[in-house]
Image (tube, rainbow, N blue to C red):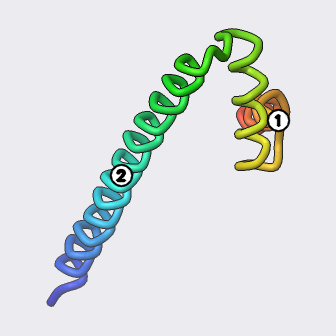
């Protein structure tokens, strides 16, 4: 196997890894969206008001997941974009 063949082989191996990771990410994203839709449907069925009450509940869930409020997370992400 020549050096060029190895480079091509390595390229396809890396590409396959990223394609698999992308597919995994898409599946997780879709599952997350489905879960979120079920949760908001549940809130609506139990007379939770959209807007402020949804925002409060969403912020609690987000804080438990990330350790940051939604606002703090947005600030952190915007700072990363600047850097």
The C terminus - image quarter? top right
Residue 48 versus residue 25: which sits nearer the camera?
48
Rendered image quadrant of residue 76? top right
Determine the image quadrant of residue 29: top left
Relative to 48, say whether 39 is above or below: below
Q: Is residue 82 visible to us here?
A: no
Whether label 1 touches label 2, CB < 8 Å: no
From the top left corner, tell me how far across and down residue 35 is, in percent: 47, 39
Position of the N terminus by quadrant: bottom left
> Outermost residue, bottom direction?
1
Q: Residue at x 46, y 28 (%)?
A: 37
**Image vertical order of residue 53 relative to residue 15, above or below:** above
Q: Is residue 79 left or right of residue 18?
A: right
Compute the Cα span from label 1 to label 2: 27 Å
Specify whether 78 is left or right of 1.
Answer: right
Instruction: Give coordinates of residue 14: x percent, y percent.
Output: 33, 68
Dot label at residue 22: 2
Q: Position of residue 70 (x, y in %)?
A: 77, 31
Residue 64 seen in the current view: yes
Q: Identify residue for label 1.
A: 69
Q: Residue at x 59, y 23 (%)?
A: 43
Query: Which residue is rendered at x = 26% and y = 72% of the image?
Result: 13
Of 16 and 42, which appears nearest the observer?
42
Name the residue: 22% across, 67% down: 12
* Kind of element beneath mark 2: helix
Q: Report crowding for label 1: few under 14, some 14 to 19, many 20 or more residues within 10 A (C-alpha).
A: some
Q: Along the polypeptide, which appears first: circle 1 or circle 2?
A: 2
Which residue is most to the front? 46
Q: In front of the other: label 1 or label 2?
A: 1
Q: Which percent across, then down, holds residue 65?
A: 71, 49
């Amino acid at each position: 196997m020549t050096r060029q063949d190895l480079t091509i082989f390595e390229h396809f191996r890396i590409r396959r890894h990223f394609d698999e990771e992308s597919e995994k990410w898409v599946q997780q994203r879709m599952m997350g969206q489905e879960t979120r839709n079920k949760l908001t449907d549940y809130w609506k069925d139990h007379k939770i008001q959209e807007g402020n009450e949804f925002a409060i509940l969403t912020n609690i869930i987000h804080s438990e997941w990330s350790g940051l409020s939604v606002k703090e997370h947005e600030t952190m992400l915007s700072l990363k974009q600047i850097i």
